[in-house]
Image: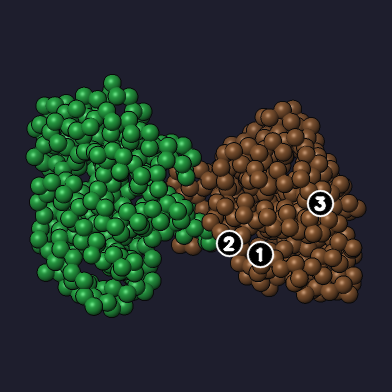
Chain colours: A brown, B green
Amino acid sequence: MEVILKNPLDMHLHLRDGDMLSLVAPLSSRTFSGGLIMPNLIPPVTSKEELISYRGRILEAIGDDNFTPYMTLFFKPTYTEEFLKDIRDNLTAIKLYPAGITTNSEGGLSGFDLDEIGDTLDVMSSLEIPLCIHGETNGFVMDREAEFGAIYELLASNFPNLKIIMEHITTRDSVELLDIYDNLYATITLHHLLITLDDVAGGMLNPHLFCKPIAKRYEDREALREVALSGHPKVMFGSDSAPHPQDAKEAHFCSAGVFTAPIALQLLTELFLENSNLDNLQKFISDNGQNIYKNLEFSPKEVVLEEREFTIPNRYGDVIPMFDGKKINFSIKEVR
Amino acid sequence: MEVILKNPLDMHLHLRDGDMLSLVAPLSSRTFSGGLIMPNLIPPVTSKEELISYRGRILEAIGDDNFTPYMTLFFKPTYTEEFLKDIRDNLTAIKLYPAGITTNSEGGLSGFDLDEIGDTLDVMSSLEIPLCIHGETNGFVMDREAEFGAIYELLASNFPNLKIIMEHITTRDSVELLDIYDNLYATITLHHLLITLDDVAGGMLNPHLFCKPIAKRYEDREALREVALSGHPKVMFGSDSAPHPQDAKEAHFCSAGVFTAPIALQLLTELFLENSNLDNLQKFISDNGQNIYKNLEFSPKEVVLEEREFTIPNRYGDVIPMFDGKKINFSIKEVR
């Protein structure tokens, strides 16, 4: 059988910079029409100049592919109305990291003092700039996202006109917030739909499945699957594909991030088909994102997948993908 | 200040075999008077011949040190009364592994059918052979020990004359079982007194702190500390020190085990002193074990520790210890 996906969008993507950008950008641009590009470079993207320059490097890295990078700024509470008005047409969203919560987030936000961040969030509301959030506290690793729920609620209720995207949600609690607050939305990754903490640390420890937020319990994965497979209109695919060189993963101190960009469509097709929800994959992979973000430009593309065995490569350059070496049932036949 | 520990015993110790045995055995025998040696070699120790031979290799590896290895067999439900009577004087305990639950446990027990294992456990009761158990189910990694509680209760209530040691307990639930069943005892490791899952996977992933059972929550660690620091008579030190070469830890698939043998006494002294329970350390490190196991022979030894900065070595051979490079407050001054 064949499956055709129109204009796949990856609404949470790490393309890095330099050699890594050159390696991984084409692995997204081949099959995706667009992607929301995370700003946590070193240093993070916090100015119009840096944003435009980074966009240029991305376009250079993807070469002739049709792919639209949706640019983001790294949230700072110091962003003024003047600054945001000036940059509005160049960006799609602003990404907020709590300080120190994940890779290259050292310059992130400490605390959620509405007096400190309120002005910036008000301007974002009026300019209709969505706020994407890595929603974890500094608490116990398995509780961080659940603890952050109160902050999502604080922000959602105090800024009702601000579109807030709960990025890479991993828990049942987060899923439930979607139906309580009109202005909360979510991305879900491929790996959180497929793995639990058992895959990371239940047998031998697998650093290539270590990510933030860390994979959770079976009941959490079940909640994520239910909401994604149902085609829930407030949920969209964001891979959080986050490449690290092999020697930064198989190391004394292993960086967080799972690399999935080039295998995401194949595995999502398999997952949605297995659960008889193939019709909803188009919503999850593109339509919902277009509706949530509104007015997204993208590079028209149809990806044709066919039911044919595909062995996930052992490596892409010096990056080991999720499930390296595993045989799966769907291959990409054609991109047109 | 100086602290003197008499006859320290490590009641749960992996010495491995071959080159690794040669490397790590002297790192225990230098400061410990005796240790309970785990039988999960490849193949596991299941015969008198293998047990005596392994004991000989251990004695050879420790050279001139005074150290008494307490030998164990790998539990099999096929052990007969005749076999156990014959081997009784050569062993201290029998170690039960559920199948596949940790390193080299593939030949372990599947299920806990009392019809299958009852005869062997009855003989062990009458011969007063303690049963040491790695108490985890095959469930979700954070729940395995809690789920195993029901099996501890089943065994403790059906074999009231069998001394059952809950090995390397990691949860508050397990601690609570100690005061419910007369015949349940426990070992606690150094690392489970010091770390939580946050240290393993809360920041960067640290494979050298990955072990089974996996480190749990703060409230679990608190329960372990309370019972160990109180000198509870049913609790004894068992390091579960489990060396792996660096390249088996910093790898795509990382083996479980934390190596602590040569730094255990220093860190325990620091921990007990910080919590003003130094008087109870002698109980935890030796006296309780002697009382629980009864008639343990050991090699008399006094370890003198002094309050002097000690930097944990970055490596012992090709094994990276816990907290490598960390400065701690206690050094071993003298062993006499």
Q: Secondary structure at mark 2?
A: loop
Q: CA distance from mark 1 to mark 3?
A: 20 Å
| Residue to which mark 3 is pinned | A183
- Percent from the top left, x then y, of residue A212? 60, 55
N-term mark: 2 or 1 = 1
Disc ID at residue A98? 1
N-term mark: 1 or 3 = 1
Q: Secondary structure at mark 1?
A: loop
Q: Amino acid at mark 2?
A: Asn
| Residue to which mark 2 is pinned | A138
- Who's the residue at 29% across and 57% down the image? B230
Compared to residue A87, the image places residue B211 above or below, namely above
Q: From this viewpoint, is residue A304 visible?
A: no
Q: CA distance from mark 2 to mark 1?
A: 9 Å
The quadrant in which the C terminus of chain A is found is top right
Compared to residue A90, the image places residue A314 above or below, namely above
The quadrant in which the N terminus of chain A is found is top right
Q: Amino acid at mark 3?
A: Asn
- Who's the residue at 53% across and 61% down the image? B203
Q: Which chain does tag 1 point to?
A: A
N-term mark: 3 or 2 = 2
Is there CB contact under 8 Å for labels 1 and 3? no
Q: From this viewpoint, is residue A78 visible?
A: yes
* Dot 2 alpha-carbon crowd within 10 angstroms: few under 14, some 14 to 19, many 20 or more: some
Q: Secondary structure at mark 3?
A: loop
Instruction: Give the camera-side residue of A308 and B5.
Output: B5
Front tag of 1 and 3: 3
Is there CB contact under 8 Å for labels 2 and 1? yes
Instruction: Give the camera-side residue of B2 and B140.
Output: B2
